Image (spheres, grey):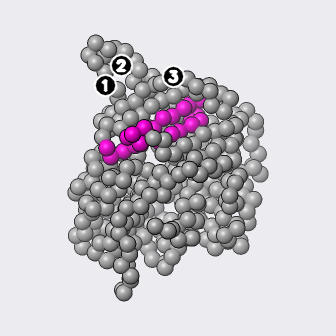
Amino acid sequence: MKRSTADRRARRCRPAAARRCRAGLAGILLAWAAAGCAAAVADDAAAWLVKINRAAAQVSFSGVFVHLDDGELHATRVIHRVTDGMLQARMMALNGERREVVRDADGIRCYLPESKLGVADSREALQGGFPRLESGDLARLGQRYKFTAAGVARIAGRMAQRIDIAPADQFRYGYHLWADTVTGLLLRSDLVSDSGEVLEKYQFVSIDFDRAISDSELQAESRAAPLQWYGRDAPVSPASSESADSVDSAAAAAPAQPLPWRFAQRPPGYELSRRIRRMSPLGGREIEHLIWSDGLSTLSIFIKPLGPGARVNWEGPMRMGAVQTYHRNLAGHRITVMGEVPARTVQAFAEGMEYGG
């Protein structure tokens, strides 16, 4: 199905660092005779994954990474500085259309000067890169994934520890990760299907941890004034981890009315983590954005009201590289479920939604 220009621009504007480099934790099951060895391997992999998450919030660096998705190769220069716990970053596309992403205390801004378009989001709306995994996450993820430490390889001129993450069921993908042995920073990430196919890859080709990063390097080269800006989301309070069959509990503390949507038959392990209200660039209607996660895999559900006399849109699955999408029209709303998860997962969420309003 052909995507609109606006859809393609929105997809390009999604910050790469916030989409991919992810890590997760789980347990490994081996035979009883090897139980002692299994515990040592699992502990080692868990320690590396915790180190990956800490490095994302603590390590300053600059470098170039490549992204392979749906047969297309993209190169991006990234500058990442952490000062007194404050993260600032800037990413610049090195091929294709000019685009630039800047992250600072004010939020995240994406500049597309050739299209005269800009998209702004709050830091909360685009939490990404590396999930913050605390000790309490280990047991929960251990029910959904198995992990192993799998040797050392050379990435971008540095030695990197490999960690393999395998899903325990058909509702999530696996990962192969390589972390810098000195800093813990993730140097390569492969998203892997249940058949072993690499669906998407991020890899640094050069990286520097030693040089000082100036303030000017973190400023956008593109001018904001000539661009038409969209976004500027207003995040709603985080969802309670106890929410089960309804998103009403997630909206209870928000000024907006609770949503009348239920998810009684969603895939196991996924919990509602955030709810965001955003304005659609097309038509100006408010869209509800619900983010579901199992602690590693994440998907989004966009709920847009259809106006009177609106054309009934096509329904069903669609794939955009590693991102699976499922569209459904329900109770006067356009439902879009999308994420880097198997097609059966987005379909289960979409078809399991119920309207109770």
Q: Which residue is mark 2?
A: 38
Cα separation between marks 1 and 3: 19 Å
SS at mark 3? strand
Residue type at mark 2 is: Ala
The image quadrant that residue 95 belongs to is bottom right
Quadrant for the C terminus, please: bottom left
Q: Position of residue 221 (x, y in %)?
A: 75, 59
In the figure, 104 relative to 81: above or below?
below
Q: Is residue 330 left or right of residue 216?
A: left
The image quadrant that residue 335 belongs to is bottom left
Tell me whether the residue at label 1 lies in contact with that at label 2, contact meaning CB atoms closer than 8 angstroms. yes
Residue type at mark 1 is: Leu
Q: Is residue 282 visible?
A: yes
Q: Which residue is mark 1?
A: 29
Q: Position of residue 350 (x, y in %)?
A: 31, 61
Cα separation between marks 3 and 2: 15 Å
Cα separation between marks 1 and 2: 7 Å
Residue type at mark 3 is: Gly
Mark 2 surroundings: few (<14), some (14-19) or many (≥20) residues within 10 A: some
Q: Position of residue 6 (x, y in %)?
A: 55, 70
Q: Position of residue 186 (x, y in %)?
A: 56, 36
Q: Is residue 72 left or right of residue 213?
A: left
